[in-house]
Image (spheres, helix red, strand yellow):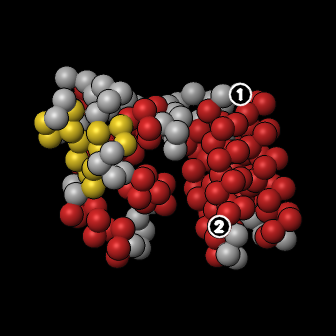
């Protein structure tokens, strides 16, 4: 059985507890996705958060395996079937997508963070082989912006980066 686009995802008690307690080391991307899961959003809705279906499916599967979310399809609770899990996308983003994402992140680092992440950003973007190679860099950049209270700017810039990399 494969998940269809209308499968609904909901947080378990354990997932709600994770959001309240904010365990150290819990991946930021998974925490953001867990926050969005409310029992009303289907796979299509969650793709607005992460348009890379392979990456989204991987994160959903990881949350499910940890017992943090569950899934309903056709009104019945189901386990996310292994056949629904796709491998992490190993496709390298286009040069234009990388350049756009790099420009957004580097400009934000320069204007808000005094280039404190410049070395990491340059190193990461020069060695990228697939979108997932950028995740640590993006998470670190987002954390630095949010620590300065720049939540709105961080969210807007992250949306621009995700849009660029989804092309």
Would you say 158 lies left or right of 89 here?
right
In 3D space, how far apart are the residues under numbered discs 1 and 2 (Cα atoms)? 28 Å
Q: Residue at x 79, y 70 (%)?
A: 113
Q: Residue at x 70, y 70 (%)?
A: 150
Q: Residues within 10 Å of mark 1 (few under 14, many from 20)?
A: some
Q: Quadrant of the N terminus?
A: top left
Q: Identify the residue position indicated by label 2 in the image.
A: 151
Instruction: Work out whether residue 153 can be spotted.
Output: yes
Quick one: 129 or 34, which is closer to the camera? 34
Quick one: 16 or 62, which is closer to the camera? 16
Q: Residues within 10 Å of mark 2 (few under 14, many from 20)?
A: some
Q: Nearer the viewer, mark 1 or mark 2?
A: 2
Q: Residue at x 66, y 38 (%)?
A: 163
The kind of secondary structure element at disc 1 is: loop
Would you say 21 lies left or right of 111 here?
left
Quick one: 53 or 49, which is closer to the camera? 49
Q: Position of residue 45 (x, y in %)?
A: 44, 38
Q: Position of residue 64 (x, y in %)?
A: 26, 48
The kind of secondary structure element at disc 2 is: helix
Determine the image quadrant of residue 18.
Answer: bottom left
Q: Position of residue 92 (x, y in %)?
A: 63, 30
Q: Position of residue 62 (x, y in %)?
A: 32, 48
Q: Quadrant of the C terminus?
A: top right
> Is residue 38 depicted above or below 91 in this figure?
below
Determine the image quadrant of residue 22.
Answer: bottom left
Q: Tag 2 or tag 1, which sits nearer the N-term?
A: 1
Q: Residue furthest top?
A: 1
Instruction: Work out whether residue 23 can be spotted.
Output: no
> Is residue 132 depicted above or below 35 in this figure?
above
Would you say 121 lies left or right of 85 here?
right
Q: Residue at x 44, y 41 (%)?
A: 46
Q: Identify the residue position indicated by label 1 in the image.
A: 94
């Amino acid at each position: 059985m494969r998940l269809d686009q209308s499968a609904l995802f909901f947080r378990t008690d354990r997932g709600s507890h994770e959001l309240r307690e904010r365990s150290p080391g819990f991946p930021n991307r998974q925490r953001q996705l867990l926050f969005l899961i409310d029992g009303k959003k289907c796979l299509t809705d969650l793709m607005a958060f992460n348009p890379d279906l392979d990456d989204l499916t991987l994160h959903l599967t990881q949350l499910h395996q940890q017992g943090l979310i569950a899934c309903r399809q056709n009104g019945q609770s189901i386990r996310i079937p292994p056949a629904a899990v796709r491998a992490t996308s190993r496709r390298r983003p286009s040069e234009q997508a990388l350049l756009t994402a790099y420009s957004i992140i580097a400009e934000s680092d320069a204007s808000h963070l005094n280039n404190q992440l410049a070395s990491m950003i340059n190193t990461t973007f020069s060695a990228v082989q697939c979108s997932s190679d950028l995740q640590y860099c993006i998470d670190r950049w987002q954390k630095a912006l949010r620590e300065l209270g720049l939540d709105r700017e961080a969210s807007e810039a992250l949306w621009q980066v995700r849009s660029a990399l989804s092309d």
